[in-house]
Amino acid sequence: MSKPPATIPASVKQTASVIFLHGLGDVGASWLEAFNTYRIPKAVPHVKFIFPNAPIQRVTLNMGMPMPTWFDIHGLDQNAKEDQPGIEKSSKYLSDLIEEEIKGGISPERIMVGGFSMGGAVAIHAALTSPHTLGGVLALSTWLPLSTTFPKALISGDKKVNLPILQCHGDQDSMVQVQWARLTEQGIKAMGFKQYTFKEYRNMEHSSCNEEMEDVKDENKEKRNEDRHARNKDTDNRPDRNKLAYTDACNLYWDYAMDNRYVYFMGKIVGDANPSTFQLINDGYAKDHKEIYYMGEKIEYASPHTFQLLGYGYAKTSFAVYYLNKEISGADANSFQSLGFGYAKDEDDVFYMGKKIKDALPSSFEFIGTSYTTDYSSAFCLGKH
């Protein structure tokens, strides 16, 4: 039996859901952290995010060792045996989660499913065999499972016209080779899907990258615009909102906007930010000629002249290192580097989500997956032994 899903509830009235499945040996919480790092829930506050946990099962590819897995894996080559009962069982589990959201009042076209690696395979299968036309599929570093059963297994309806599918893959993926993704692209296009997009990322291995996560965020663009409209309507009577100025405001990315007098974030004026020099950086960071801002909040003592974005929520200036909007006490700016999915290190310490990992050795510390890392003597998951 698997653990209950990790969830991020909608911060306002829920009108949509995203269900995202992790890969082999992982846990739902690691992708919850990844989505939080990129502030995706912040960008779509009407969306509830659900990150299920796979049950612990033996994996043939891993010499029969038990680990979290959605189905058994017999090999990494194209002709390896597929675990059809396991795939269909996990697909049914995902379908049940979809039905729970529908019973809760969310319409199918407002439910998006997705996943990484084998989790993405389950998501594709569930979406194509569902009696509903869902809001979309996020397929990261994955493939179409049980491909020989399609198109017969496809429950179409209006999916070929109205089901958006975003497939993302790294060209250096040695686990799920990119040719698998290209075969999936050919198969889905051959079935006649009109809203299918394939994106390939240079030098990306079996993991994720900033560009891919930005594309994941952009896949929610329609929902974000709808949510922004509702949010702006809710803030019409706030005393700190200049109605006349905001009516003519120029919308920026990350829910910023500005006019010739003010900069706004989610409908609220951003302190003393200067619109004539204000510019977005990335990952929620922005600056004017005097200050650095994160999601509308000023970062104290951060200099815009030496500010450098490191990725995965980390940034630095000449003298300080930051995770999101907080300075990391004791971190060395000269040697600091972001490793991926919340992990980072300098010459003396290793960090996870901006906090030091006790007893981790930076000289031998390596990032090996979406939640796992090692040094010469220990393995870590989500920053813990």
Image (tube, grey):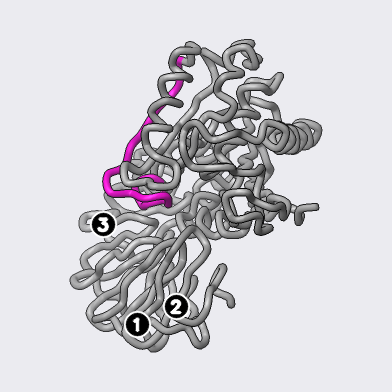
x 59%, y 26%: residue: 146
Magenta stretch contains residue 365: no
Mark toward the start of the polypeptide (3 vs 2): 3
* Residue 260, position as x, y percentages in the image: 27, 49
**Circle on res. 375:** 2
Is 15 in front, or is 188?
Answer: 188
Mark toward the start of the polypeptide (1 vs 2): 1
Element under disc 2: loop
Is the residue 177 above or below the residue 63 in the image?
above
Task: Estimate the spatial distance between the alpha carbons at disc 1 and disc 3, rounded to whole Å.
Answer: 39 Å
Instruction: Report the quarter where the C terminus lies.
Output: bottom right
Per the rendered image, the range of residues in magenta is 194-212
Is 295 in front, or is 141?
Answer: 141
x 61%, y 40%: residue: 18
| Residue denoted by label 3 | 278
Element under disc 3: loop
